Image (cartoon, rainbow, N blue to C red):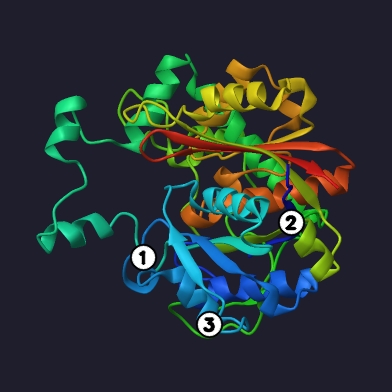
Amino acid sequence: MAEAYIVAAARTAGGKRGGRLSGWHPVDLAAQVIDALVDRSGADPALVDDVIMGCVLQAGEQSGCIGRMAVLASTLPQDVPGVTIDRQCGSSQQALHFAAQAVMSGTMDCVIAAGVESMSRVSMTKLPAVYRDAGLGHYMSPAIHARYPGPDFSQFMGAEMMSEKYALSKDALDRFSLQSHQRAKAATLEGVFTAEIVPVAVRMAEGPAVDSMHVADEGIRMDATFEGISAVKLLREGGSITAASASQICDGASGVMVVNARGLKALGATPLARIHHMTVFGGDPVIMLDAPLPATRHALKKAGMTIDDIDLFEVNEAFAPVPVAWLQTTGADPARLNVNGGAISLGHPLGASGTKLMTTLVHALHQRGKRWGLQTMCEGGGQANVTIVERM
């Protein structure tokens, strides 16, 4: 069977809402990562067959097929096409799957899978009201309401449901959240992220111009304490989730370059990793967030592997109950999970998070001299992608 290799993986450092990346148009931010992938791989830009870009909030500055717009803002030739996909938070992980499938089929030899989200400029909380006020309706159709009676699908409700289903205490969730900040702090201070981060100029949407480069994730609480985290107000009375145990709203872009053997030869590049297995899985859209649990079991079974075969895991920290329940049900070694922190500390730029996590995973495998890595994340509508890679 034909194989798919990652030859470059890069991301911007995360920017807080209204922070150091908030002045970047998302198209131009995505183009920065595209150009970095070409530079780091040493590829002739004309060899790129396609750009597949994940983006969730496809409105305003992120509308009009942002995948193609990012190509036009980059140094790639204009005859390189681009497409935009939405599998919610797994959008760029799915972009990676599509890219791998394209090169494995032999119809393409070199594809960039990427993602971008400017949550400062295209607001997740404000956008539904814009559509409602414009009379454009809602995605919950009468048929969906008939099949799933009750309130609209909600990730916040799903997080609380996960806590109840898996009997997770607020104390356990807060301790996991603290660990995320501690690991991200250590990784930042030790320069662990330097190799994967694309330096970009600081551009603030408001305030005076700042003449510096954005090279460190902005959301890490360097002074985080358990007392501080546990004191944050609950999102729901009687619940267990707070803003401190949820992922941070974030601006960012990320991407990987994927090739087959023919593309590898044409580029003259050295592969970072081989894509060993890909799974996508659908679960309950009401609880929504626990699909990574059965998806991981499904992926390992299809790959003929056990949880102990995997050296490092990246499970997106959309809410703390997701990785905590994932650990509980898989029996994975907690020391191998999100070793450099996750979205609770580093941010979750929606459509960019898939290839962001893969970038961190591939670099961590190299830094630690490990062989196998597994990435998974929960997605809107009750879905999950799982990708298993082998360090080369």
Residue 100 location in percent, x, y?
64, 51
The reply to whether the C-beta atoms of the residues labelled 2 and 1 are less than 8 Å apart is no
Real-space Cα distance between discs 3 and 2? 26 Å
- Earlier residue among tags 1 and 3: 3
Real-space Cα distance between discs 2 and 1? 35 Å
Q: Residue at x 62, y 64 (%)?
A: 112
Crowding near the residue tagged with mark 1, few <14, some 14–19, many ≥20 C-alpha atoms within 10 Å: some
Residue 96 is at least partly visible in this image = yes
Question: From the viewer's perspective, is the residue at label 1 or at label 3 nearer?
Answer: 3
The amino acid marked with disc number 2 is Asn
| Residue linked to disc 1 | 122
Q: Is mark 3 on a helix, strand or loop?
A: helix
Image quadrant assignment for residue 301: top right
| Residue linked to disc 3 | 73
In the displayed structure image, the side of residue 157 where residue 183 appears, left or right: right
Crowding near the residue tagged with mark 3, few <14, some 14–19, many ≥20 C-alpha atoms within 10 Å: some
Q: Is mark 1 on a helix, strand or loop?
A: loop
Real-space Cα distance between discs 1 and 3? 19 Å
- Earlier residue among tags 3 and 2: 3
In the displayed structure image, the side of residue 61 where residue 190 appears, left or right: right
Residue 86 location in percent, x, y?
41, 53
Residue 14 is at least partly visible in this image = no
Image quadrant assignment for residue 151: top left
The amino acid marked with disc number 1 is Val
Q: Which residue is drawn at 46% across and 47% down?
A: 89
Question: From the viewer's perspective, is the residue at label 2 or at label 1 nearer?
Answer: 2
In the displayed structure image, the side of residue 135 where residue 1 appears, left or right: right
Crowding near the residue tagged with mark 2, few <14, some 14–19, many ≥20 C-alpha atoms within 10 Å: many
| Residue linked to disc 2 | 260
